[in-house]
């Protein structure tokens, strides 16, 4: 098992019997104490972040991980189906793991999935996606004095505030961080 000094950002370790993703590491050597490693990590099962100190010679259990870019195929109730474009292998991921990312998944859309022992654990989507406007109301004529926006429903059901000139059927770019309109695609 590797020592705590060898921990790097992006690795997954077992801590208190749960898998944790390393988000930050800092090696510290205070003047009158022994060196330690300050680690900021996130529990992959519950999503909570925590900071932990490890003594430099402590050994930690680093898990074998694999990160793959998968294509979203379809959603069936609480199960989302993804396919590996290289091997054509399909994976089913439950809605609880997908979370709010479901509002940004469209057919053939890409997502990075982290696997531990060939089981999907987390999903990361791009910072922006292109979505089709399914429905939006007409802008009121003369209401152009300032940056006026109207709600528009996307093909995934997400409601985004868009400028008045956006019509149903148009493709727009949407930020996945906050669901805001970024521009036409």
Image (cartoon, grey):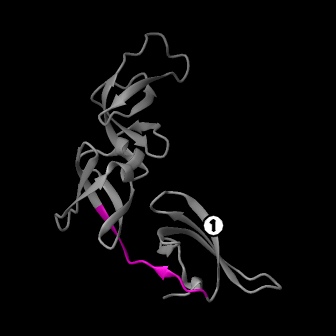
Q: Which corner quadrant holds the C terminus?
A: top left
Decide if residue 158 is on the left or right side of residue 78. Answer: right
Residue 172 rendering spot, x and y as whole percentages: 36, 36
Would you say residue 64 sits in the magenta stretch? yes
Between 44 and 149, the one nearer to me in the picture: 44
Between 99 and 17, the one nearer to me in the picture: 17
Q: Which residues are magenta?
A: 58-69
Residue 37 rendering spot, x and y as whole percentages: 65, 79
Numbered disc total: 1
Work out which residue is located at the far front of the displayed protein and give it: 17
> What residue sits 53% from the left and 24% below the top?
147
Q: Quadrant of residue 135?
A: top left
Query: Is disc 1 placed on a helix, strand or loop?
Result: strand
Query: Residue tagged by mark 1?
Result: 51
Work out which residue is located at the far right of the displayed protein and give it: 32
How packed mark 1 is, by other alpha carbons closer than 10 Å (few <14, some 14-19, many 20 or more), is: few
């Amino acid at each position: 098992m590797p020592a705590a000094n060898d921990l790097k950002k992006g690795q997954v370790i077992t801590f208190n019997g749960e898998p944790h993703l390393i988000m930050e590491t800092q090696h510290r050597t205070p003047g009158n104490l022994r060196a330690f490693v300050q680690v900021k990590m996130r529990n992959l099962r519950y999503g909570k972040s925590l900071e932990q100190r490890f003594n430099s010679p402590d050994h930690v259990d680093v898990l074998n991980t694999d990160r793959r870019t998968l294509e979203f195929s379809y959603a069936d109730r609480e199960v989302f189906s993804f396919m590996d474009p290289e091997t054509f292998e399909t994976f089913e991921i439950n809605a609880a793991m997908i979370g709010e990312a479901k509002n940004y998944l469209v057919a053939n859309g890409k997502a990075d999935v982290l696997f531990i022992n060939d089981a999907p654990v987390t999903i990361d989507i791009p910072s922006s996606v292109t979505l089709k406007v399914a429905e939006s109301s007409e802008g009121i004529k003369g209401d152009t004095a300032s940056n006026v926006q109207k709600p528009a429903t996307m093909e995934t059901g997400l409601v985004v505030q868009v400028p008045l000139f956006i019509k149903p059927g148009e493709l727009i770019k949407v930020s996945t961080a906050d669901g805001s309109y970024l521009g036409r695609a």
